[in-house]
Amino acid sequence: MKTVRLTSSQALVRYLAAQQVDVDGQRLPLIAGVWAIFGHGNVAGLGEALEAERERLPTWRAHNEQAMAHAAIAYAKASNRRRLMACTTSIGPGATNLVTGAALAHVNRLPVLLLPGDTFASRAPDPVLQQLEVPGDPSLSVNDCLRPVSRYWDRIQRPEQLLDSLPRALQVLTDSIECGPVTLALPQDVQTEAWDFPARFFDPCLHYHRQPPPDSGELARAVACLRNARRPLLIAGGGVHYAGACDALAAFARRTGIPVAETQAGKGALPWDHPAQLGAIGVTGSSAANALAAEADLVICVGTRLQDFTTASRTLFAHPACRLLGINVSAFDAGKHGALSMVCDAAQGLAAIEAALPDWQADADWVASGRQAVAGWQAVVERVTAATGAERPSDAQVLGAVNRQAPEDAVVVCAAGGLPGELHKLWRCARPNGYHVEYGYSCMGYEIAGGLGVAMALPQREVFVLVGDGSYLMMNSELATAVMMGLKLVVVVLDNRGFGCINRLQKNCGAGPFNNLLADCGQGESGVPVIDFAGHARALGAQAESVTGIAELEQALVRAREAAGCYVIALATDPGPATEEGGAWWEVAVAEVSTREGVRQARRDYLEHKRAQRRDVGR
């Protein structure tokens, strides 16, 4: 057997560089690159190996470990999970900064390879700098924090362990069912130790996207269920995108007439003006989608994990005979809420149902009711997103301006706060992958780093990042990275001077404004700071300006599109209003005992909504 002597790090990097993937018949590197912030725990081992392979496996430098994980995850999502990136950090704070990113990837079923340095396997110099000492268990390090947020976790104690661990890691990263974050903790001494690896271990390996068809029995039951339904509704989740099933869904919905609603992850699966399109569903849903959801006797859940925002905390599907049909590649997700499950790829499942019901169509009156509801909803969208002369516009008015100025194939990126709710309701998405909102983990600080990852994955499309002042202050460093890499982001910072979304929630739960808007926080003698976001963005290397009102914003967006490189536009917005139309109840527990009458009333309202909560849907 021919062998090659390499360090663990060199073997790992060479193996990653050899992984390839078939994307629509094109052979591409599976690992698009490695994000790296070096420290004493990885610079001499993995750093040395990456430098040697930089032509085949590019290395990118970030400014924050959590942010670079977000960028890698966004890249994978924008690539429909066909390609991915890796991240390496030193031991200690660099490693623990990955935990939030790993949790985000785990929740959203997105692949990212995490390669944190670790303490010495030999324990000879213990306690090494940044080592967490656990008196009762010397085998633990901070990397064990990544265990519960990883789909696969291993600590490489010997070079030869890579022969088993790396293929298993790649299996998880490329599998449509197990897909999620993988952590390989790398003790810094083991990174530099050499071993005679089999040469064929580094042969090119081509990965294919697995698309399992449905079981014949499950398909027959699903077809019978649909044939008997009078008011079917289809919910499109992120799995529609990951399966490459957007065109299949559009054709299926057009032929059958079944109304289609979209989750946050599924938005963009149908163009906003498709005749079957109802818009967003759930807590941040359109009035059209939620009205039909309340009357549906069958809800076909395609590629969605049915989180509480989708089901309005299990109050949305109100028809007493409503059944759920879960079409999902994951049995765990397909069977949620007692759904009749059809475990398969979304594209395969839709094609199989189409073949089994070639002449079936939804009831004409039901289809007409959906289209009538959508017409009313689109009038709402036009009204709430229209330009006004307000000095401090609403979030809806801002995103309306961006939507009007953005090209049809643009990508909007957002994550947390009130903006995702308004975007889910109101953004008109014309193309698949044009709506990139991280709302599974709703992670503040994802926006700019996520935009960076999207720009790398989709270089031919313009990327618009919408971010609140709270998220911008939480994590903005990768704006400097985008500038350094020559990538373009158009970033719109909505400054409502605090956490406006949670301030509204706080008041809706009966409490007074407290510790959310800056004006309601503890302050020193200087009072509330006035933050120059445009000035800050210029300090990071971007072009930037501050504007007032929608008219100035639209003019600035024209300049931003014409400019080369990153362009930041900051404007003050009103923290109060959110679109009243649409939406549904969301369970946020309210204090059972309080001295405030507002809280006591909110508790009574809470209990009233709880009575509508169902655990029997689908059973």
Image (spheres, helix red, strand yellow):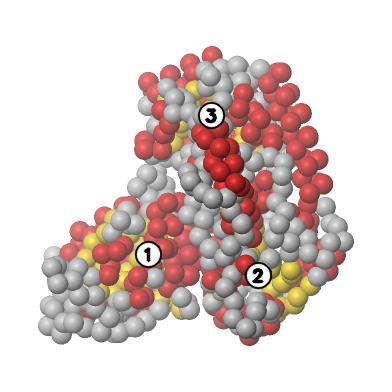
Q: Name the residue under label 3.
A: 612
Near-viewer residue (62 or 517)? 517
Q: In which quarter of the image is the C terminus?
A: top left
Percent position (x, y) of residue 325? 47, 27
Percent position (x, y) of residue 303? 48, 39
Q: Name the residue under label 1.
A: 99
Identify the residue at horizontal 65%, vertical 70% (top origin): 519
Q: Is residue 436 visible?
A: no
Point out the tag, 3 or 2, that comes first from the N-terminus: 2
Identify the residue at horizontal 81%, vertical 46% (top origin): 382
Q: Residue 59 is drawn in which quadrant? A: bottom left
| Whether label 1 touches label 3, CB < 8 Å | no
Q: Residue 159 is drawn in which quadrant? A: bottom left
Near-viewer residue (568 or 3)? 568
In what element is the residue under mark 3?
loop
Q: Which of marks 3 and 2 is in front?
A: 2
Percent position (x, y) of residue 300? 52, 29
> Can you say whether 493 is above or below 206 in the image?
below
**Badge 1 density bin: few <14, some 14–19, many ≥20, Cα 10 Å:** many
State the separation of the CA atoms marked 2 and 1. Answer: 32 Å
Q: In which quarter of the image is the N terminus?
A: bottom left
What amino acid does circle 1 point to? Val
Q: Name the residue under label 2.
A: 519
Q: Can residue 369 be seen in this view?
A: yes
Q: Which residue lies furthest to the front in this view?
A: 595
Q: What label does residue 524 carry, if any?
A: none
